[in-house]
Amino acid sequence: MAMKINKEDKKWLKEFARRLKKRLKELEVTQEELADRIGVVHSTISTYVNARSVPLTTHVVRIARVLDLEVRDLIDF
């Protein structure tokens, strides 16, 4: 059963998704390319970009590394 996301988490997810989308666009990296580079399926990245699920910590670290960011650039807000 999926975990219910509270209001505060939804705000966080939307901001994370906004920052992720912005960086993908800046670097001209597709969701599929990012998925391949961090070792997940495309649908995982899609759920993050569309603010539908909380990303795993390990994924955030990998995403930051691939997108040449500090983790805090994605989650510190």
Image (cartoon, rainbow, N blue to C red):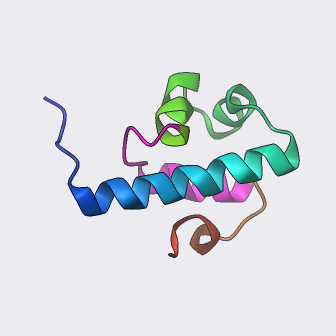
Q: Is 72 within the magenta?
A: no
The picture places residue 75, in percent across and down from the top left corner, at 52, 67
| Residue at 55% from the left image edge and 24% from the top image edge | 41
| Residue at 55% from the left image edge and 34% from the top image edge | 45
Number of numbered discs on residues = 0
Q: Is residue 56 left or right of residue 8?
A: right
- Closer to us: 75 or 62: 75
Q: Is residue 66 above or below residue 35?
A: below
| Residue at 80% from the left image edge and 44% from the top image edge | 25
Q: Is residue 26 left or right of residue 56?
A: right
- Closer to us: 37 or 6: 6
The picture places residue 76, in percent across and down from the top left corner, at 52, 75
Q: Is residue 29 above or below residue 59?
A: above
| Quarter of image, res 39 | top right
| Residue at 64% from the left image edge and 40% from the top image edge | 38
| Quarter of image, res 68 | bottom right
| Quarter of image, res 3 | top left
- The span picked out in magenta is 50-65
- Closer to us: 22 or 44: 22
The picture places residue 29, in percent across and down from the top left corner, at 81, 38
Which quarter of the figure is the N terminus placed in? top left
Q: Is 64 within the magenta?
A: yes
